[in-house]
Image (spheres, grey):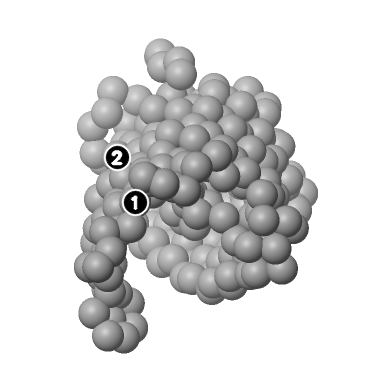
Amino acid sequence: MPSARTLALAFCVAWVAMPATDLRAQAWAQPDGGYFVKFAGNYLFTTNEWSVDGNEQDIAADDPRITDAWFRDVSFFAYLEYGLTDRLTLVSSVPFKILTSEFTQNPGGGLPTRRVRLTNQGLGDLWVSLRAPVSVKPFAAAFQGGVKIPLYEQPKDEGFLTVPPLGTGAADAEIGLYLGKSLYPLNAYVSGGIAYRFRGGDVHDEIPFNIEGGYTLGRLFAKVRLEGVRNTEKPGGSVIAGDENYLKLSPTISY
């Protein structure tokens, strides 16, 4: 387990893309001049991490210089769909992130311990994609391809005193196929998709996938979503900060 960047990298780069995936994976296109705008938030707080062998442990458990550590990610997302034509929809999303890590530093050598808090905030990765529908009946289907553009600079490496980065700092590209089906006359739908993500930097490519179902009752909207990412290559004995491999179930109720 890498000790120098455990607090700075082990969490935020693994979570930075997850809400964006949820927002972008849709099968329906906007009509010419039509648009859809959404604002969302995400909160993560943890005192645990995963070790190389897949065991849950305290943050930086392998580093005697760090104890009582926690990490927090507060993110706000803006999402836009805009119909450039009836056959082509622009899709874009960008987060504003406030990342904080805090821990007790134990320098050793008879020096006193001290409590350290490291914070970084700003715009994260901008996703810009184009969605092209290929069918409407019996179900909606669309191809979508786009790029991820970092809107920040990577912090200077200061070992375990490095502030949490807002992302991997590398550009990515993605192409996917998304399907959806309205269950009318019920106010319900099902959708899903799979993509291939070409990742920049030293991290490995990924295969994101998802399936969800939603139902509207008056002003209430309920949704259950299963999504995940599978890495195309297992890192092996050394962790590559920014690699992802997860499965997540997300029930949601909105008003």
Image quadrant containing the C terminus: bottom left
> Dot 2 lies on which element?
strand
Check disc 1 and give the amino acid type: Lys
Under mark 2, the amino acid is Leu
Crowdedness of circle 2 by 10 Å Cα count: few (<14), some, many (20+)?
Answer: few
- The residue lying toward the viewer, choosing from 249 and 29, is 29
Residue at 34% in and 51% down: 181
Residue 123 in the image: above or below residue 14: below
In-image side of 152 versus 165 (left or right): right
Left or right: 4 with respect to 213? right
How many numbered discs sit on the rendered protein? Answer: 2
Locate residue 138, reporting x and y percent. 36, 45
Residue 193 left/right relative to 51: right
Which quarter of the picture shows residue 254?
A: bottom left
Any mark on residue 181, and which? 1
Q: Looking at the image, is mark 1 or mark 2 earlier in the sequence?
A: 1
> Which of the numbered marks, if any, corresponds to residue 247?
2
Identify which residue, 191 or 146, lies in the foreground.
Answer: 191
Residue under the point 65% across and 69% down: 34
